[in-house]
Image (cartoon, rainbow, N blue to C red):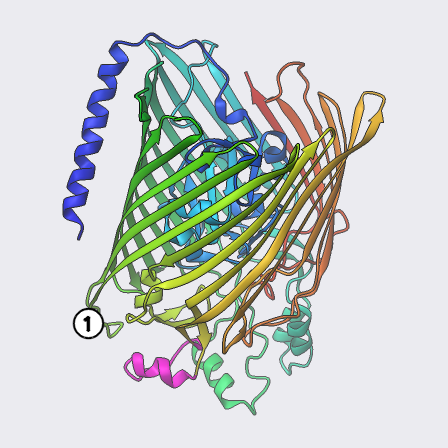
């Protein structure tokens, strides 16, 4: 499987790592400089670093004080207030970003440009193995630009950028960053710190660590949604009626996480090269679905039999996750007539998590071993033309063993070639990108899942073309057209078993073809003295869109050797689909009160998705509006904001309606030391009125609401 390309990639990496020290011997240590990622308007994920206003598709950056204020234990909840972003919200410990209604396989979550190397894509109850506490900034790319990171990034890319491999030589003998947080809703206690030490000759050593412990999450109302509470109230069993009255604490949602990492890098004026090694462990509970139909309705023999035989009420499963990973990053300046620089990024990780039953026994074990590398060739600017090209290699070995195994052992191997070319004509900019991707997937025979073993190969080609025009000074109008192809994932091809995380018997189809789509996106961006505006509108037309839908149990029983099912039968299928929506973000300076600027900002987003022959796509976030008012000077920021999520009435056949909700939040941030923007104390009150809130994008929304009133205190130190 792609052995020759892998050998060539390995040789290229070896040559790169051998050549860079030689270059370093002829260079002199650089003058200390500010960390370039602190320039919040530069999008480094765009391969060719560009200012945010010059990107031809929707982008967001979370950094500095905004990141400190938004910081949560999961990457999904940290980003949930960004335009076009929701979260899977499978309790407080497992929450993955949802971009433009897309989740799972259609969103790539990266750490400094390569994958997170976990199994969060296989199930919503599996946490992402990226700790937001380590982030210096988080960049979100949506639209065609994201496809340079893989065809599975059709929804977008979330890139968490950290400093584990140092990018600069500190000008202090020891540089220290630290952060500590307390959150009242889950009795959350977090502490994290990192140290960078210049050790001479351009070498910089790095070490960091973090620890988080939380109790059960306190919610803002009833645990069960109103329709389930109504069923519980009518039950003949007192225990079920008590379940319907549960409110406040969400059972089995405590967590304990720790992580350590070390890195070493050479930083010179001709290039840099570094590596890091990290280990993390996370033990967390996942909320249970409280069954309120059990045995009280004896007229429905089918439902009664399911619950009497299998009984899923109050199963407090705990997940124990651990990951060890190694990362490499390097860049060498060529300064040639055609080639300006060469960049290398690679990562490898071994991952395991055990799903532990209430008895203490391990029910299922998931293992994942992954490697990803990217080699990027950055062209020298020639007149109005610049660009970049590269190659990306990814491999994954996945296995699951235990009573809830729903996938056979499988391997995925992928090799991609990509290019991005841009021409700047002054008022007009033109850009084109392309990606060719070869994917091979293999499942091993598994008698437990009645699978004889399958091999599939896919060749996918994606391309985009775009243009932006300055209509008046400070205002640009852009248009992108993209044609994308995505290979099915192993889960979509080979799934065949009961999956407790989604409460479904999942049945894949090994005969799936490529998922293809056309995408059109328009953007309007403008800024001036005291204001800014960003609008994006998009429409995607899918051919062979892969989705899961409930079917008659007999379909899954036939695939399961005739055995009875623990959960309803969900079968993956392909059909045409349409996604369209918009995102808007704006800010304006209203005036000045003494030394304080008064700023108003707002966010709005909406997505509508339809699967031909099936109806509305499931788990699509509704219209959302968010507005904030700030008083700000150089050292003090006072902010209040209101977020309103409308009710979602446009639902799939297997879903329930989600009520709208309004959250009111406030925060106060103070920088105690003049000239030190990275040291601050932030106090925030979230969901001040303690309302009951549920995200429609969550499969667990009817059983696990969001946090109630949460008072958070965060202290950040940088010296």
Q: Which is nearer the eye, 626 or 685?
A: 626
Query: In the image, is residue 522 above or below residue 271?
Result: below
State the image quarter where residue 483 is shown.
Answer: bottom left
Residue located farthest toward the bottom when viewing the structure as drawn: 299
Numbered marks: total: 1
Please say whether residue 110 is one of the residues in the magenta stretch. no
Task: Give percent across and percent down for residue 191.
Answer: 53, 31
Query: In the image, is residue 132 above or below residue 486?
Result: above
State the image quarter where residue 5 is shown.
Answer: top left
Q: What stretch is highlighted in magenta?
A: 552-569
248 horizontally vs 548: left or right: right
Q: Which is nearer the eye, 515 or 660?
A: 515
Task: Give percent across and percent down for residue 18.
Answer: 19, 23
Q: Which is nearer the eye, 540 or 160?
A: 540
Q: Look at mark 1 in the image and give the residue it sits on.
A: 452
204 horizontally vs 443: left or right: right
Query: In the image, is residue 689 above or below residue 236?
Result: above
Residue located farthest toward the right when viewing the structure as drawn: 593
- Regarding residue 27, the answer to whether it shows in the image is yes
Quarter of the image with the C terminus is: top right
Task: Give percent across and percent down for residue 472.
Answer: 67, 36
Element under disc 1: loop
State the image quarter where residue 562 is shown.
Answer: bottom left
Mark 1 closeness class: few <14, some 14–19, many ≥20 residues within 10 Å:
few
- Regarding residue 347, the answer to whether it shows in the image is no
State the residue at coordinates (29%, 47%). 416
Task: Give percent across and percent down for residue 13.
Answer: 22, 32
């Amino acid at each position: 499987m792609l052995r020759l390309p892998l050998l060539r990639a390995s040789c290229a990496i070896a040559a790169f790592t051998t050549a860079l020290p030689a270059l370093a011997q002829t260079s002199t240590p650089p003058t200390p400089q500010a960390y370039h990622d602190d320039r919040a308007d530069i999008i480094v994920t765009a391969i060719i670093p560009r200012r945010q206003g010059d990107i031809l598709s929707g982008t967001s950056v979370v950094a500095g004080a905004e990141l400190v204020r938004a910081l949560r234990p999961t990457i999904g909840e940290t980003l949930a207030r960004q335009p076009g972003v929701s979260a899977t919200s499978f309790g407080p410990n497992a929450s993955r970003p949802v971009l433009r209604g897309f989740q799972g396989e259609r969103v790539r979550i990266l750490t400094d440009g390569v994958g997170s190397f976990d199994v969060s894509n296989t199930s919503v109850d599996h946490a992402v193995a990226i700790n937001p506490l380590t982030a210096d900034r988080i960049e979100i790319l949506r639209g065609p630009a994201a496809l340079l990171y893989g065809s599975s990034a059709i929804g977008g890319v979330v890139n968490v950028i950290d400093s584990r491999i140092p990018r600069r030589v500190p000008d202090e003998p020891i540089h220290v960053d630290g952060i500590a947080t307390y959150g009242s809703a889950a009795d959350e206690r977090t502490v994290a710190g990192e140290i960078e030490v210049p050790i001479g000759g351009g070498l910089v050593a790095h070490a960091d660590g973090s620890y988080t412990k939380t109790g059960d999450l306190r919610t803002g109302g009833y645990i069960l949604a109103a329709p389930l509470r109504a069923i519980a109230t009518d039950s003949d069993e007192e225990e079920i009626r008590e379940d319907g009255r549960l409110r406040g604490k969400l059972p089995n949602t405590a967590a304990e996480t720790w992580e350590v990492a070390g890195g070493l890098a050479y930083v010179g004026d001709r290039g840099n090269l570094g590596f890091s090694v990290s280990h993390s462990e996370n033990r967390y509970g996942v909320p249970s679905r409280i069954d309120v139909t059990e045995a009280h309705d004896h007229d429905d023999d089918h439902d009664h039999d399911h619950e009497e035989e299998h009984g899923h009420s109050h199963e407090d499963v705990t997940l124990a996750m651990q990951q060890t990973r190694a990362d490499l990053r390097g860049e060498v300046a060529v300064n040639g007539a055609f080639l300006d620089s060469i960049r290398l990024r690679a990562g490898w990780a071994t991952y395991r998590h055990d799903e532990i039953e209430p008895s203490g026994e391990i029910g299922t074990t998931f293992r994942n071993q992954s490697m990803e590398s990217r080699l990027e060739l950055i062209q020298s600017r020639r007149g109005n033309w610049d660009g970049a090209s590269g190659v990306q290699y990814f491999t994954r070995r996945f296995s699951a063993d235990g009573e809830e195994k729903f996938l056979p052992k499988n391997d995925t191997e992928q090799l991609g070639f990509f290019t991005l070319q841009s021409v700047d004509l002054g008022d007009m900019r033109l850009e084109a990108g392309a990606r060719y991707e070869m994917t091979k997937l293999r499942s091993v025979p598994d008698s437990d899942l009645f699978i004889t073993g399958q091999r599939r190969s896919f060749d996918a080609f994606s391309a985009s073309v775009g243009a932006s025009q300055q209509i008046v000074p400070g205002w640009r109008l852009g248009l992108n057209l993209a044609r994308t192809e995505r290979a099915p994932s192993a889960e979509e091809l080979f799934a065949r078993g009961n999956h407790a995380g989604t409460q479904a018997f999942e049945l894949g189809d090994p005969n799936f073809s490529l998922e293809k789509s056309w995408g059109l996106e328009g953007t309007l961006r403008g800024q001036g003295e005291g204001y800014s505006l960003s609008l994006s509108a998009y429409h995607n037309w899918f051919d062979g869109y892969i989705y899961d839908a409930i079917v008659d149990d007999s379909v899954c029983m036939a695939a399961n050797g005739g055995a009875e099912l623990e959960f309803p039968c969900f079968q993956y299928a392909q059909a045409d689909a349409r996604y369209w929506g918009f995102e808007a973000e704006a800010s304006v300076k209203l005036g000045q009160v003494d030394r304080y600027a008064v700023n108003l900002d707002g966010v709005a987003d909406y997505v509508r998705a339809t699967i031909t022959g099936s109806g509305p796509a499931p788990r699509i976030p509704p219209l959302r509006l968010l507005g904030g008012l700030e008083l700000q000077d150089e050292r003090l920021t006072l902010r209040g904001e209101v977020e309103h999520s409308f009710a979602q009435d446009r639902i799939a056949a297997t879903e329930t309606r989600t009520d709208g909700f309004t959250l009111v939040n406030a925060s106060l941030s103070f920088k105690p030391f003049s000239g030190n923007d990275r040291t601050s104390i932030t106090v925030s009150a979230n969901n001040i009125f303690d309302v009951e809130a549920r995200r429609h994008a969550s499969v667990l929304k009817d059983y696990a609401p969001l946090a109630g009133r949460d008072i958070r205190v965060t202290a950040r130190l940088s010296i």
